[in-house]
Amino acid sequence: MLLSTKGTITYGPVRSRRLGWSLGINALPPYRKTCTFDCLYCQYGRAAPVSPDTARPGFPPVDDVLAAIEEALAGDIPQPAYLTFSGNGEPTLHPQFGDLVDGVCALRNRLVPDAKVALLSNSSLAGNTEIASALSCLDVRIMKLDAGTDALLANFNRPWPSLGLEDITRGLRSLPSVTIQCLLAGGPEGNSSHDDIESLIACLQRIRPRMVQLYSLDRDAPTPTLACLDTARLHAIGRLMDRAEIPTMVF
């Protein structure tokens, strides 16, 4: 079952498999997917990808985002371990993303100093100098990479047309202490063939992430040509990555 897009700036805290109690921050337009990718497996369904130049208006102002976070933290909620940029698509599309990061970090320091500020991103704008500078200020950067070739990126993740794998790889290499999140799927349009994994490993060796998190589909995909990989297959791929000196965890 697909998820509904969020209509609020904050949500949760939710219990994340990777982060524990996490207060989600949706600094994207409400009730619609706004993303640089149109991944075949997206939990919000399919929608044409946008670029920073073609994203439509509707992003909440920075002051509104910070006010919503402060209001959420003042409520009767579990103490979050993380304040996490995520939401209805790609968080770094916000036109004032750097100001958002500065504001959220200052808010964290004042109200929940033990929490970390994290981001879930598809990595598409990591090569942008201003975005990369903002990302370097975060405590945790969980960045996506599902493909090791331009052809697979174009079919599996379906970014806006001018975005290539080299742009993404170069951006990820420039960031400190990156965690890579990689969804692997089987089926006719999957990304888990022998050649797919070999090319992904080669790409990851260039990036040298601190950790790669492998997982597969945990809900129905909007594209019927994908299939979930079982845990045994994920662990087998994880062992290949470990042998290539890429630290890996399977979820």
Image: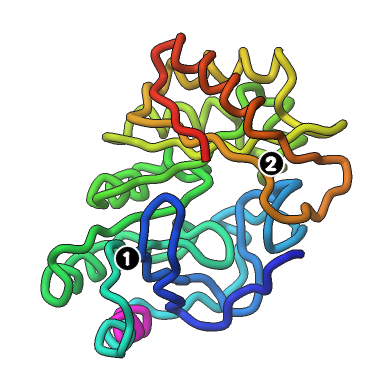
Question: For numbered disc 2, what is the local secondary structure?
Answer: helix
Which residue sits at x=58%, y=61%? 89
Using the rendered view, name the quadrant where residue 74 is placed.
Answer: bottom left
Q: Which residue is mark 1?
A: 83
Q: What is the magenta segment's predominant secondary structure?
A: helix
Is residue 161 depicted above or below 62 in this figure? above
Report whether 50 appears left or right of 132. right
Question: Which segment did they paint magenta?
Answer: 64-69
- Please indicate whether residue 74 sits to the left or right of residue 158 in the image: left
> Type of residue at label 2?
Asn
The quadrant holding residue 196 is top right
Whether the magenta-drawn stretch holds residue 86 is answered as no
Query: Residue at position x 27%, y 35% from top?
Result: 176
Label 1 environment density (alpha carbons within 10 Å; few <14, some 14–19, many ≥20): many
Pick the front one: 55 or 16: 16
Q: Position of residue 98 (x, y in %)?
A: 31, 60
Image coordinates for residue 23, horizontal then vertical, percent: 37, 70
Quadrant of the frame with the N terminus: bottom right
Residue that label 2 marks? 157
